[in-house]
């Protein structure tokens, strides 16, 4: 069975184990680049703000694979992986991991950046901030849409 | 006019606003836009969130789509706010 390259899961992940498993088959990898996204406490103060990650089961996996394939096409990568957690998370928890392997570093570094920018605006996840005082859906950031332009991608507005 | 059956899903803040997570309905809508107009008939809340919502996103069969995307019997349509993953 082929190891999974897209994982959407509630469970936490171990970065060094994921890197170890991903690069184990390859003797020609010279560069491993990664991005790790973590939960920030949005409500710094007395009451802690937790995070709830909602997603669209089925579409989430497809969308992330599309992101990963786009990176594999654009750069000279040996392999890549995306893990994204869902469900109840708390400050300092790990949320998302993108990994890219290449012979030389520029491909892996650029691919990781690209995968994060692309998934932030195209993968069906929604964050909800939960505090003892109530819940609030987190708004999408315009800087994420701006980041897309860097790669020549369009934001996914509901076009005609 | 013949109707066909589509499944419609709503996510996140939009689901909360419409108080509907999922439904299967018979519709004559041939495109996403026609479906949006049909659903907007339910009242001001639906109309505001579907037709007056510049940030609305839609997928058909789990692919991001447009208003002009055609609908067929058995399709799965989802409406949602801009995504905030990562």
Image (cartoon, grey):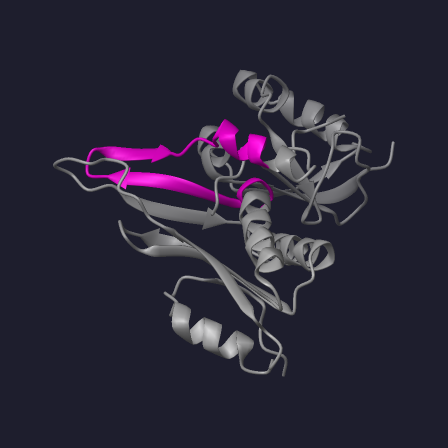
Q: Is residue A144 magenta?
A: yes
* Position in image of residue B33 (x %, y %): 74, 27
Quadrant for residue A108, please give it: bottom right
Q: Is residue A83 visible?
A: no
Q: Is residue A25 magenta?
A: no
* Position in image of residue B76 (x %, y %): 69, 47
Question: Observer-nearest residue: A104 or A154?
Answer: A104
Q: Where are the magenta residues, as a range?
A: A120-147
* Residue sitting at x 79%, y 40%: B71
* Residue sitting at x 54%, y 82%: A24
Q: Residue furthest left?
A: A46
On the rendered image, what quadrant is the C terminus of chain A found in? top right
Q: Is residue A78 visible?
A: yes
* Residue sitting at x 63%, y 83%: A1
Quadrant for residue B66, please give it: top right
Where A9 falls versus A30 (above or below)?
above
Q: Could you tell me how many numbered marks the image carries?
A: 0
* Position in image of residue A65 (x %, y %): 64, 58
* Position in image of residue A143 (x %, y %): 50, 30
Where A6 falls versus A59 (above or below)?
below
């Amino acid at each position: 069975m082929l190891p999974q390259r897209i994982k959407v899961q509630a469970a936490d992940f171990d970065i060094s184990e994921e890197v170890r498993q991903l690069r184990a088959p390859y003797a020609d990898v010279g560069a491993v680049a990664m991005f790790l996204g973590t939960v920030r406490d949005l409500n710094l103060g007395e009451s802690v703000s937790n995070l709830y990650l909602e997603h669209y089961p089925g579409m989430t996996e497809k969308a992330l694979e599309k992101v990963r394939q786009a990176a594999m096409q654009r750069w000279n990568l040996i392999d890549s992986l995306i893990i994204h957690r869902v469900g109840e998370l708390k400050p300092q928890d790990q949320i998302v991991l993108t990994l890219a392997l290449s012979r030389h570093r520029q491909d892996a570094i650029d691919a990781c950046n690209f995968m994060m920018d692309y998934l932030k605006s195209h993968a069906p996840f929604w964050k909800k901030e939960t505090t003892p005082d109530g819940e609030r859906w987190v708004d999408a950031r315009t800087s994420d849409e701006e980041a897309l332009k860097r790669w020549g991608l369009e934001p996914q507005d509901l076009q005609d | 006019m013949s109707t066909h059956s589509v499944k419609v899903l709503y996510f996140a803040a939009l689901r909360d606003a419409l108080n509907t997570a999922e439904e299967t309905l018979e519709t004559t809508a041939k495109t996403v836009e026609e479906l949006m107009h049909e659903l907007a008939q339910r009242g001001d809340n639906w109309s505001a969130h579907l037709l007056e919502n510049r940030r609305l996103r839609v997928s058909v069969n789990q692919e991001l789509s447009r208003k002009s995307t055609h609908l067929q019997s058995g399709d799965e349509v989802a409406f949602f706010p801009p995504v905030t993953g990562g």
